[in-house]
Image (spheres, coloured by chain):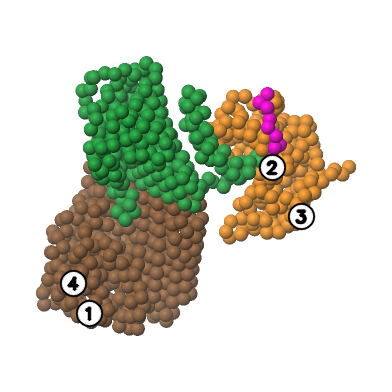
Amino acid sequence: MTDVYNINTSPALTFAKLGMNGDRISVNTSLIKKENVEQYIFGNGITDTDDIDEALPGGAAGQDIDRLLSTESRIMTVKGNAGITISFSGSGVIRRVLKVARGVEAEVVEVVKGKAPDIALNSTSYILEKNARLKLIRIQMLDKDTLYVDDLRAKLHEDSYLEVVRLDLGSKRSYIASKVSLEGKNSEYKAHGDYLLNGSQRLDINMIAEHIAPDTVSDMRCDGVLLDSASKIFRGVLDFKSGCKGAKGAENEDVILLSEDVDNQSLPMILCGEEDVEGNHGASVGKISDEIIYYLMTRGFDEEAAVRLIIRSKFNNITSQLKNSDLRDVINRQIDGVLS
Amino acid sequence: MTNEIILEIKDLCTTVGEEKTPILRNVDLTVGRGETHIIMGPNGAGKSTLGFTVMGNPAYEIESGKIFFEGEDITDLSADKRAVKGIFLSFQNPIEVPGISMRSFLKSSLQQITGKRIKYSEFNKTLEEALSLINMDPSYVDRDVNVGFSGGEKKKAEILQLLVLRPKLAILDETDSGLDVDAVRTVSQGIRAYKERYGGTLIIITHNAAILEALDVDKTHVLVKGKIVETGGADLTDEINRNGFEKYTDG
Amino acid sequence: MADGKTLITDVDHKRYDFRYVESSDEYIREEDGFTEEIIRRISEEKDDPEWMRDFRLKCLDIYNHMDMPCWGPSIQELDLNRIASYVRHKTDMKNNWDDVPDDIKETFEKLGIPQAERLSLAGVGAQYDSEIVYHNLKEEVAKMGVVYTDVETAMKTGYEDMVREHFMKLITPTDHKFAALHGAVWSGGSFVYVPKGVKVDIPLQSYFRLNAAGAGQFEHTMIIVDEGADVHFIEGCSAPKYNVANLHAGCVELFVRKNARLRYSTIENWSKNMFNLNTKRALIEEGGKMEWVSGSFGSKISYLYPMTILKGNDSKMTYTGITFSGEGQNLDTGCKVVHAGCRTSSVITAKSISKSGGIGMFRSSVVIEKAAKESKCSVSCDSLMLDSISRADTVPAMDIKAFDADVGHEAKIGRISDEAVFYLMSRGMSEEDAKALIVSGFADSVSKELPLEYAVEMNNLIKIEMSGHKA
């Protein structure tokens, strides 16, 4: 059964003619099989549980995509550091709820790999209880003919802190839908995503930070490099709901374009219904600044080497956060492969 | 004694921007190997432009004139080729490069310039020597290039690069500006080491006499409105420090 | 801070709100709605050339088949069957204020138009409901070959070909439903032609007044600035408040030829029952420069995004705009730019203020085409929230297809700092004055782009809005 699904519809619409308000995908649901997706958990920081007693946040991918989430959620508790590998071997849907218990401080490294030409759908909800702190590193290195949907949701209780670091390298088309609800007073969310797209890769991002409680803080950054005929759309939303007094939000984008055939679309939005907030967004799009290239050239690098150095250093910011040196090497090799 | 000529600028005219605003007007300058030249001049005279032009900054257009380095015409060479030939420019505002440590940056820079692979042990020795010459805390080299450095730290980091790369000609653009007394002393110590240990040639662009105290100045050039209006010896530096540029700018 | 008080002088709240009721024997008013019979009658009344009549009918057909826009504020309350397409006084266009009927003349006097003409304008046009009632151009400007009249007159005085070549070529009827409606019922507006190399030192101004309740104003503005010429055009608009909806669906088409410059300033203060669905577009050729200055204060709902097509190499655009959304207002404003030529540049600076439940939306679109090599664009957008029952949203879209483009974007949202208010109050200012002063300061980047009289007018409008408009 092939059906068409709306995906990543923008929370606020722009001029319809720009074609930036959302996308649609066709999915053959009969190909989706449970055995096509495996989850491996490393370390003993994560255990299965069955207690979940609160409403889960809605996703940024949209209600249409919710229809694809027919499988049961696996419910887990995060008590400490852990690694998770999710591997696709055909159309698959994985749905998980991870609860970071009160006061727990943890780092979870998730690697998504494998191959699924029709759809690989990874839907994850994180619930951070009071005072919980989670650093989530997600590395996506799916095979280059995969259609990937990454539906990340998080709900932050009082005084909790979520940091999401992500690196998107693989798949042919990917959709990143991320919605973080800052529901507890004083909760904080920081996101830093990097992507490297070449060939005809396309990345479609819909990232929402929803400030509900007072004194909440968000800081979203999404940087990337486009080569060949790659294309990308970034929709980022700071949504200040009435009552989120003292909230602060920032979103930033920095995109480097390295080929004549790329297409880069950006829609960085601020929606504001509260007076006492501070919101900022900034974007810079284009080639690497002449000044930086010149500085590196005065130190002996030719222009091409200077560009490579700058891009490598950009990704170093992410890969240097990985403690697993094997994984770091695999990623660095993949980056070098694209840049050479 | 006349030294072998290392840099020769002949009748150089440069402009900047779409409007082709003239900056340098018919500048001639000859520098011998091992010499120390000082460029002084009021703000906006074109001192930084002179440094950038010798280092091949594409933002400045050479309208006429030639630049020779070790007898070879380098007027049309890109900045990296000039660096390989042995020219170094210390920036007034060094650029930040997030994501790459000073250590690995300097190592690959040195490899680019020398065209040789350098062993870690050998490189570390060079680096430690340079660090100790300017009393710089070794932890700096494990930080990203210039990221989060104070103004003074950035200037010191440029001198560190000078001491690691050991070019034949170093142009120092206001390396002393914005530094406190101690930092000026450290930086000039580094410059002296470059000159004495590695036989370096220097063009120093400055407002300030303090940095020159420990150096033997061969020539001082006064640049006003893009022209070298006077050339003299070390005593000219002292005179300008006493009297300023009024006598060149009036009328 | 006595200076602050003189800066924001006391104003008559009723300045824009007076009205004269049109008596049926002095005015011609079309029946409500938009039908073929009505369009034919308007066309006949205007003695249109045949091509224009056919164009109107084609537009009506497009209008009937097009959907309402789906992305902006809701305009469901606007019942298009209850809008009169055409209202005019039974007088002709005059070039002497003494000949203008008394009620209309007094209206414009209260708005300060004849006074401004004497003081600082090169030419003035004044539209009352559907028709231009007054038009005059200083003799010395006319002598330079500058043409300033309405589109209807232009077609009858030797410029028919020029009108036909340009009319709704930038804003085509299929662009959106209200562009189609405009094409069908357009009436009045301005036609300006500035010949090659002619520089007009002082501005031209057209003022649009919609006086009739439940009516629409559909003026068409066409400005052609020929090679190397330079002109500043000011547009002002206002209307008294009614309990029924009024509609403004004008079109502005601007042609800036090689190395020419056009500055287009608008101070818009429609009444708060107005649906302002206006379309403005400019085409800039090589080395040309378009400057938009825009202050939006009035209307119930606005859709307003002046668009610039930087077609020629090295052409430039600046947009400086401010929008003040108060009680009951939903103002959706911003700008659009398409970079098509090489080395084109655009600078967009927008400010928005929301108060007393008003909704302000900044919406923009920047497209850099693949061929627009080495182009630059910078967008900066500041919003000020004055309370928590209002909204300020920012939706800026960018589509960059040229890899060597240089695009920067910044947006900020925030409130008046308590410290700043306290500082001014500690120097003896009332809280209201302190806030008004801070808001005026926030708006300064726009007001300094306006001629002095208009900057004063804008500060007056801010002062009115800050003290709570008594409608």
Q: Is residue B91 visible?
A: no
Q: What residue is at 73 percent from the left and 43 percent from the top?
A: B85
Q: Secondary structure at mark 3?
A: strand
Q: Is residue C95 magenta?
A: no
| Residue type at numbered disc 4 | Tyr
Q: Vertically, is C192 above or below C383? A: below
Q: Residues within 10 Å of mark 4 (few under 14, many from 20)?
A: many
Badge 3, how many Cα within 10 Å: few under 14, some, many 20+?
Answer: some
User: Which of pointers 1 and 4 lies earlier in the amino acid sequence?
Assistant: 1
Q: Which residues are magenta?
A: B113-121
Residue A40 position by quadrant: top left
Q: In the image, residue C110 lies at what x, y percent?
A: 24, 67
Place of residue A234 in the rendered image (x, y in percent of width and height, measured from the top left):
38, 44
Residue nearest the observer in this picture, A34 or A199:
A34
Which chain contains the residue that carries disc 4? C
Q: Colour of chain B?
A: orange
Per the image, the residue denoted by label 2 is B83
Q: Color of chain C here?
A: brown
The amino acid type found where label 2 is placed reads Ala
Task: Return the residue nearer the eye: B16 or A85.
Answer: A85
SS of the residue under disc 1: loop
The mark found on residue B10 in the picture is 3
Q: CA distance from mark 1 to mark 3?
A: 74 Å
Q: Are marks 1 and 4 in contact (CB under 8 Å)?
A: no
Instruction: For mark 2, give the secondary structure.
Output: helix
In the displayed structure image, the side of residue B101 where residue A55 appears, left or right: left
| Above or below, comparing residue C256 to residue B250 in the picture | below
Callout 2: chain: B
Please name the residue shown 28% across and 37% down the image.
Answer: A31
For label 4, the residue is: C86
